Amino acid sequence: MGMDVVPLSVMSKLFRERSVIPFLGSAASVVGSTENQTVLSVTKLSQHLAEIGKYPGSASDPLT
């Protein structure tokens, strides 16, 4: 598997098993996007992940 292929099925399995900790850098929301694609800002991406991951902290938590 090349570096340009994202193993989504493997990542999904690891998230469900709670055996991986995601680390998002400042450009995580733009990786792989093209000029014609609209991507989430870092703030909106982290809020979205907190929502779908059922993060128990508050929306103002520095982790979001």
Image (cartoon, rainbow, N blue to C red):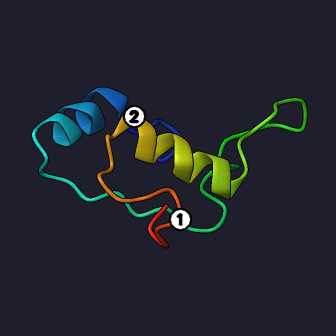
Q: Residue at x 65, y 56 (%)?
A: 43
- Measured as percent of width and height from the top left, residue 18 is found at 13, 47
Q: Residue at x 66, y 42 (%)?
A: 32
Q: Is residue 41 left or right of residue 61?
A: right
Most foreground residue, 25 or 10: 25
Q: Amino acid at mark 1?
A: Ser
Q: Residue at x 35, y 59 (%)?
A: 57
The residue carrying mark 2 is 52
Placement of 54 over or under 23, stated as above or below: above
C-alpha gap between disc 2 and disc 1? 16 Å
- Measured as percent of width and height from the top left, residue 61 is found at 46, 68
- Secondary-structure class at tag 1: loop
Q: Residues within 10 Å of mark 2 (few under 14, many from 20)?
A: few
Most foreground residue, 2 or 29: 29
Q: Amino acid at mark 2?
A: Ile
Q: Find the residue positioned furthest to the right.
A: 36
Placement of 52 over or under 63, stated as above or below: above
Most foreground residue, 39 or 63: 63
Q: Is residue 29 left or right of residue 8?
A: right
Answer with the quarter of the image where residue 23 lies. Answer: bottom left
> Which numbered mark, 2 or 1, is in the foreground of this view?
1
The image quadrant where one finds the N terminus is top left
- Measured as percent of width and height from the top left, residue 36 is found at 89, 30
Q: Residues within 10 Å of mark 1 (few under 14, many from 20)?
A: few
Q: Earlier in the sequence, mark 2 or mark 1?
A: 2
- Secondary-structure class at tag 2: helix
Q: Is residue 42 left or right of residue 7?
A: right
Answer with the quarter of the image where residue 51 lies. Answer: top left
Q: Residue at x 24, y 34 (%)?
A: 10
Asked if the residue under mark 1 is in contact with the one under mark 2, i.e. CB atoms within 8 Å, the reply is no
The residue carrying mark 1 is 60
- Of the numbered discs in the image, which one, if any, rests on residue 6? none
